[in-house]
Image (spheres, grey):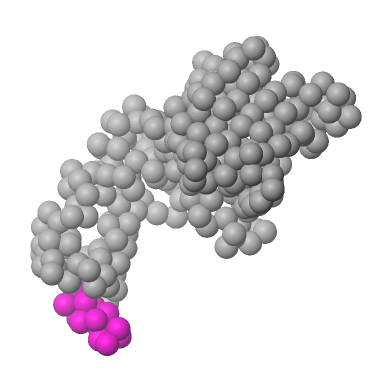
Amino acid sequence: MPNILTSDHADDFRAELLTLPAGVASVSFFACPSLYSRRTPQLIRRSDPEVVQVAICLRQTIGVSQRRQEAVIQAGELFVYDTSQPYQAWMSGNGDIARMGVVHIPRNALPLPAAGMQRILARPLSGSRGIGAVLTSFLASLASQGATLNASDLARLGGVTVDLVTTYLAHHIDALQTVPGESRQRALLMTIYTFIEAHLHDPDLAPNTIAAAHHISLRQLHRLFQQEDTTVAALIRSRRLDHCRRDLENPTLQHLPIYAIGARWGFADAAGFSRSFRDTYAVTLGEYRRAAYTSRA
């Protein structure tokens, strides 16, 4: 897609670019010290892929201007711009490196009203709460792990990407009723997974508290997990044990008693923690920790 690009570092311009094809969408991550981008009516007439772009500022600041709207985007915030309309954008590292991620989705793949989309162009959108936090976490994970994913992984993640972006944008333009039920369900499931991961340390984390936090019934929660090859309780236990296993291997945490490691990941009962670990890994907590230290010696 043609744009006019300039930079304050044109004499020694260095940048990083990672592009990930993900089904009907694609995701790209870009880093540089500074960049100014301009898309003019002439360039749009020459080539227009008719794509909606949802961008996240990962580091430093980004500026964007479209349809007489202008905003400065801080790290952790998102914004939307449209390739079919002129825009200007800039990245500034403020003496460092600026980083951003962009989800590119064909406009016809987003079942959202055009008028609503126009209202949110070039405006800062929160990425710190609810579905925004889930989308931000998802994109940050892609930024760090995307280069290790194979084509089949990326194809599967493409549907997740579109579902999350669609639900996120629908939330901001009050158009959730236009999002297909399956997309809303998958986005809700991703939100629940993120919530569970963020609250593993809480010993009160349980199916009933998760359902209440997401304003759904306990029955609805269990129904969501019917196709996940696990239960909510089993997922919580598995994720807690995985974190505990890593902590037992961590030499910087060797001063912590074993029961304290369990407690920091939500195992309030030391005996229950010991039994769950042994049942899962076929070894006691003490044996696992000693073996981890021996292998590093």
What residue is rendered at 23% in x and 78% in y?
288
Magenta-drawn stretch, dominant element (helix, strand or loop): helix
Residue 158 point in image, percent of width and height: 63, 45
Residue 239 shown left or right of residue 67 in the figure: left
In this view, 26 is above or below 130: below
In the rendered image of this protein, does residue 296 appear above or below residue 173? below
The x and y percentages for residue 220 are: 39, 34
Which residue occupies the extreme front position in the image?
11
Q: Is residue 158 visible?
A: no
Viewer-closest of 262 and 52: 52
Q: Is 249 inside the magenta-drawn segment?
A: no
Residue 219 vs residue 133, the one in the foreground = 133
**Residue in front for this viewpoint, 152 or 180:** 152
Identify the residue at image location x=77%, y=34%. Answer: 3
Whole-percent x, y for residue 10 in the image: 69, 44
Judging depth in this view, the residue of 198 and 28 nearest the camera is 28
Q: Residue at x 59, y 46 (%)?
A: 32
In this rendering, the count of numbered labels is 0
Image coordinates of residue 154 in percent, x first then y, are 63, 53
Quadrant that contains the C terminus: bottom left
In the image, taking residue 235 as reference, residue 114 lies left or right, namely: right
| Magenta stretch bounds | 285-297
The quarter of the rendered structure image containing the N terminus is top right
Q: Can see residue 172?
A: yes
- The residue at 85%/32% (across/down) is 47
